[in-house]
Amino acid sequence: MPRFLHTADWQIGRQYVQFPPEDGALLAEARLEAVATLARLATEHAVDAVLVAGDVFDAQAVSARTIRRLFAQLSGYAGPWLMIPGNHDAALAESVWTSAMRIGALPPNVHLALEPAVLDFASLGFVALAAPLTQRHTYNDLTEWFDAAQTQPGLLRIGLAHGCVQGLLDEAIDSPNPIGADRARSARLDYLALGDWHGCRQVDERTWYSGTPEADRFRDNDPGFALLVDIEASGRAPVVTRIETGRFRWRTREAVVSVASDVERIAGELAGVQASDVLSLQVSGQVDLPGLVRLRDAIGLAEAGARHLQADLSALRLVPTAEDIAELDADGYLGELIAELRDAQSAKGDAAAAAVAAQALELLATFLLEGRTAVADP
């Protein structure tokens, strides 16, 4: 029974410029480590081939060192790696692929389709119909020729493509690089391995997106998997098993603060972050000064424990109580200023002015609090 490992969207060479350098470097390195994991899994599960459905690289301008490092990760699996270019690494006249061939980086067991082709693996019981992207965007369905492709009877027909199944994916991304939703049936495919969508997703009985093996963005679409595909015989439905491959967990947490217990709940959740977490925290609502201090302390501790934590408190309003102001010894002019800023941040009709007032109030209160703490604990 032929067995395959389906993967895609490695995005090797991706730069995480939105993160601090030390975090970005580790996240980029994790993508290379994911490929080594795929090689190990392919060997452990004794697959007949690894299907790589596009976007091996994140861009065309990848260094020779990165290219060599990527292909070195494949050494853990000696069987065939079937690869096609995607939209990020399209098979242009001059591309990352021509660079890889020029420096002799491609191992002999990498079978790269730079143009539409039928890749014959009759000795392994299958043929692969490959539909590489030869430009970043196309508005024609590059898998259409699969329907008329003639292959030897009895061999599995495996499709390999990169693009958007029409009418399936959300966020108005039904173009470019379209793929017919019924392609597996019309082309008599036993399995259609797709790339482009970064989450693991089933289209129909014979069509799947594997998603990226290592999460790379704050989107809850099930990344971090590869697919083990078993097909008993031509015409039989594949048995698809998800295998976890991701090292880091990218999560988004939105929290609303209205009472003190809300702050404690958020702090408790932050106390549970792990070194594998890449977390985006967005907090809204309103909080008194002790609550803000507690929240900022919890965020600081979590930043030390997580791989990366980005916290957005811009929608959280500081509303000091009379007790808070008294604790700050903010009487006279400072007390009046805090009261004015507190009222201004709640004013309607001028959102920009309210935001400025909220920021000024937080800065002033924090400054006074730190000053009081420094005097109490010299």
Image: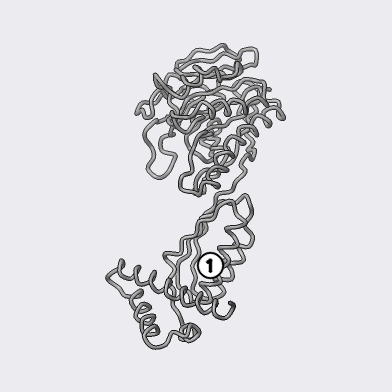
Q: Position of residue 328 (x, y in %)?
A: 48, 82
Q: Quadrant of residue 261?
A: bottom right
Identify the residue at horizontal 62%, vertical 49% (top origin).
Answer: 276
Q: Is 126 situated left or right of 86 in this image? A: right
Tell me if residue 359 comes above or below residue 326 in the rendering: above
Judged from this view, the residue extending furthest toward the front is 378
Residue 177 seen by the camera: yes
Quick one: label 1, few (<14), some, or many (20+) residues within 10 Å? Answer: some
Q: Position of residue 48 (x, y in %)?
A: 66, 22
Q: Quadrant of the N terminus?
A: top right
Q: Position of residue 250 (x, y in %)?
A: 55, 49
Q: Quadrant of the C terminus?
A: bottom right
Compare residues 194 and 59 and report the one nearer the observer.
59
Total number of numbered discs in the rendering: 1
User: Dot 1 corresponds to which residue?
Assistant: 296
Q: Quadrant of residue 268?
A: bottom right
Q: Position of residue 233 (x, y in %)?
A: 64, 21
Q: Amino acid at mark 1?
A: Arg
Tell me if residue 212 comes above or below residue 42 in the rendering: below
Judged from this view, the residue extending furthest toward the bottom is 332
Tell me if residue 299 comes above or below residue 197 in the rendering: below
Residue 232 seen by the camera: no
